[in-house]
Each structure stands twice: as C-alpha cells, then as structure tokens.
C-alpha cells in the first residue's frame, strides 16, 4: 500500500462514516441530467506525503496515464500561465471554457500577472511563479515563499473559482517542502490528480533550486464524496492495494523551470489493481 492509498482510504472512510450531508442546502453542482449533485463532506483534512521516499500514486485503480495528464495541467497553469484550454492537452477544462477557449481570469491568468516584490537587491517586478523561484535560489530561509490564486478582485471574471488556490514553500536542512491549500475537493475525481501534480511540481522546483525533495502537505477545506460516487468509492476502498514504491524520474537535468516538458517525466516502480475498472465516472459541474 502506498502513502496515497492509505490517505485516500482513511479520508474516504471518514467521509462515509461521519460526513455532513449537503441535501437541502441548495448546492450549486448539478449532474448532466440536471439533478442536484449532493454529497457528503468533512471539514479540514490534512494529508502528508514524503515525496523523497515515494511518489504519491494511488494503486487501487490505474493512474499510469492519468499522472501525465495531471503534470500537463500543472505545467499549463504554472509554466505556460495559460487560462485557455487550447494550450492544454486534455479536455478536463472544456466545460468551463467559453467560445474562445478561455476559462476567464482564473489559474494561469493569475500567475501571468506581474507585481512589484521586495528583494535583497531592491524592488523587482515579476509574477508569483518567478518570485517563488527567485526566493528559493536567493533567500531559501524565507517563510514568506507563497502563492495565492484566490484574487477577490477577479473572482467575478472567473468561470470557476480556483480549488487548489494557495501554496507555501519551505526549505529545511536542504530539503524543499510544499504546503498545498485547497478550498474544496472531489475525492473520486480529483484527490489523486492534485496530489500527483503538486508532488511533480515540488520535484521540479527542488531541481531548479538545487535542493532535495521533501514533503507535500495537502490541506483541504471541504473534502467530499458525491452521492453517485459512493458505490465507486466503496469499490476502491475495499480493493486490494499494490505493494509498490513509485518514483518520479525527470529525464531533463535543467534548472530552468520553463524548459520542462511532459515528455521529460516517467514513473518507475508503479503498478495498480488490474481487477478494478470503474468505467465512466459521472462528473458534477
């Protein structure tokens, strides 16, 4: 069983046993047939992964191809700083895009905005991503290495407000640690996805800064399972996990974050339960 399996199983069990029901609260989300997408949720989840020991991949189902799509999305947001689905190699954002492909002033748009930041050399103008990379290389002891995508001024112009909205980066004894803050998470559709992509981002930033990889701490505000996902979740948490230790290999020695490509990444030491096939998962929108 991987760290990701253990955290996923424990969190899902907690939701199923003690979760709050959303019925009667006027939920925003709907199923494709127009009915309310209700859910059970718990408040304030914190899951931790030691990425130096194991890349966090769930083995209860097949994530061997999903991981590359997740990395592609994180590069779309953090590296391309794009808010247009035409720059993304998957269709996960299509339902939120307008006729031009834009998702509004969300995600990559926020990372493309430049601000004046204090540095040891004086005021410098750069975006949030470049400021993180600057501090990791020039002031790694800082406890202010943070990003925030939840820009209240622009919320009205976002087709979907950011779910994973904030990060903090901390360097301790030569290791880079990442704290990811997420306001809301669909356990079936997004938990493994977000964990994999931000663990990969941690590995990239560590390489760029000449640091060892540390831990990923994933804080989730509202952690939920949708009603139509419950049978699928029960199938997963009752499934046999694999005794493996996945590793992310980056086949590009660059220290320039903007030189990474999806093709530079491979997963070694991963296997999954081949008996589990969930079929098409219904998505609440």
Image (cartoon, rainbow, N blue to C red):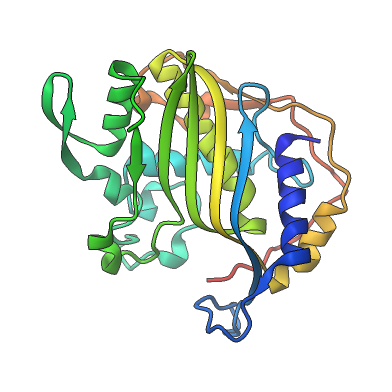
Q: Is residue 58 left or right of residue 103?
A: right
The relative height of residue 71 versus residue 105 in the rendered view (above or below) is: above
* 98 relative position to 285: left or right: left
Q: In the orientation shown, which residue stands out farthest toward the left?
A: 122
Q: Quadrant of the N terminus?
A: top right
Q: Residue at x 32, y 33 (%)?
A: 144
Residue at 53% from the left image edge and 32% from the top image edge: 200
- Residue 58 visible? The answer is no
Where residue 105 appears, as percent x and y from the top left, is: 28, 58
Count of numbered marks? 0
Image quadrant where residue 241 sits: top right
Q: Measured from the top left, where is residue 79 in percent x and y?
A: 35, 36
> 34 and 194: which one is in front?
194
Question: 90 or 253: nearer the eye?
Answer: 253
Q: Is residue 22 left or right of residue 94?
A: right
Residue shown at 27% from the left, 61% from the top: 152
Give the quadrant of residue 116.
top left
| 265 is higher (above) or lower (below) than 61 | above
Q: x, y (%) of residue 214? A: 55, 23
x 53%, y 18%: residue: 251
């Amino acid at each position: 069983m991987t760290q990701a399996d253990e955290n996923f199983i424990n969190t899902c069990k907690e939701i199923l046993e003690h979760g709050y029901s959303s019925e009667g609260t006027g939920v925003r989300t709907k199923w494709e047939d127009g009915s309310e997408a209700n859910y059970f949720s718990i408040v304030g989840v914190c899951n931790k992964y030691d990425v130096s020991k194991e890349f966090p991949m769930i083995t209860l189902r097949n994530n061997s191809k999903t991981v590359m799509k997740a990395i592609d999305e994180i590069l779309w947001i953090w590296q391309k700083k794009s808010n247009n689905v035409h720059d993304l190699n998957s269709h996960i954002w299509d339902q939120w895009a307008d006729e031009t492909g834009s998702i509004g002033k969300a995600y990559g748009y926020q990372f493309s905005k430049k601000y004046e930041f204090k540095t040891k050399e004086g005021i410098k103008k750069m975006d949030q991503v470049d400021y993180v990379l600057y501090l990791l290389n020039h002031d790694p002891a800082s406890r202010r290495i943070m990003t925030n995508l939840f820009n209240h001024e622009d919320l009205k112009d976002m087709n979907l407000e950011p779910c994973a909205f904030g990060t903090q980066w901390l360097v301790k004894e030569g290791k880079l640690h990442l704290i990811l803050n997420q306001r809301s998470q669909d356990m079936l559709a997004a938990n493994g996805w977000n964990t994999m992509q931000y663990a990969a981002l941690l590995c990239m930033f560590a390489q760029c800064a000449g640091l060892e990889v540390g831990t990923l701490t994933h804080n989730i505000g509202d952690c939920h399972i949708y009603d139509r996902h419950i049978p699928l979740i029960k199938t997963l948490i009752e499934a046999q996990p694999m005794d493996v230790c996945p590793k992310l290999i980056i086949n590009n020695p660059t220290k320039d974050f903007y030189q990474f490509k999806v093709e530079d990444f491979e997963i070694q030491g991963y296997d999954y339960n081949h008996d589990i096939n969930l079929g098409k998962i219904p998505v609440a929108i």
